[in-house]
Image (cartoon, rainbow, N blue to C red):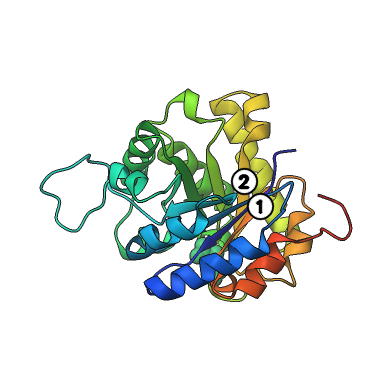
Amino acid sequence: MPVPMLAANWKMNCLADESAELARSVVEGCAGLKGRDVLLAAPFTSLHVVARELAGSSVSLAAQDMFWEQSGAWTGEVSAEMIVDAGCSHVVIGHSERREHFGETDYTVARKVAAAHAAGLIPLLCVGETLAQREAGQTAEVVERQLRGGLFEFEQAGFASLLLAYEPVWAIGTGHTASSEQAEEVHAGLRTVLADMSDTDTAAGIRILYGGSVKPDNVDELMACPNVNGALVGGASLKAEDFLRIVHHREQSGVI
Ligand code: PEP
């Protein structure tokens, strides 16, 4: 079983001081943490200050997006090298909010994933269906297309460290989380596709995170699913206490 990854997506929240304070609380709450990894995806403007707070801790830092070109006349864009320079080891790519509001496609996602890997960043690729697609019975087809499309230019060498997040669009920020059965079914399907794209052993080691209204009171059930290897947490990651409860899920029971 891969080590679970608990990732926070702060989205467009937190000024620099607030980011530093939140990061500091997470670091304090993760002291001595074993058997799980923690990642904070902060806004671009907070990356440097958060990197300072995370220095010397086991908590990793991600950006929430990037552009695939290395440098040049791309006003407003941020390259993989800049993200690395700001202290990131990871980058979120293809979040549904970027697909929905900023025209992200499987093509742009693929270019970003490949450029991230080339720069030494670990991509956290997000896939997920809309409510209409789920109701039309298209979930498996949609997430497979997003996965294969997003990894179209990805090198086999990167598969072992790749992070994948299944985030049903209808569950993000809505308070309606997927049931553990729904999450497990999609995660198992994604792992089968990953095995087809690499091999069974590699696919078994890839962490597939669930995202979509993960909260302190539903994380235990979701994390009990064999193919759920972590969580990508939006709203509940903005309060250190809630996020730390998610990080420390199921600890008392000794299951993980
Ligand atoms: C997200 O931003 O990836 C997310 C899952 O948000 P929330 O937890 O608020 O649904």
Q: Upstream in the sequence, badge 2 or badge 1? A: 2
Who's the residue at 46% across and 37% down the image?
148
Pointer 2: what residue?
208
Residue 189, picture quadrant: top right
Who's the residue at 44% across and 57% down the image?
52
Where residue 232 sits: x, y (%)? 57, 58
Say what amino acid the circle numbered 2 marks: Ile
The secondary element bearing badge 2 is classed as: strand
Judge by depth and name the residue closer to the eye, 120 or 146: 120
Judge by depth and name the residue closer to the eye, 126 or 88: 88
Relative to 78, say whether 14 is above or below: below
Q: Residues within 10 Å of mark 2 (few under 14, many from 20)?
A: many
Residue 230: which disc?
A: 1
Label 2 close to label 1 by CB (< 8 Å): yes
What's the CA distance linking mark 2 and mark 1? Answer: 7 Å
Q: Is residue 161 visible?
A: yes
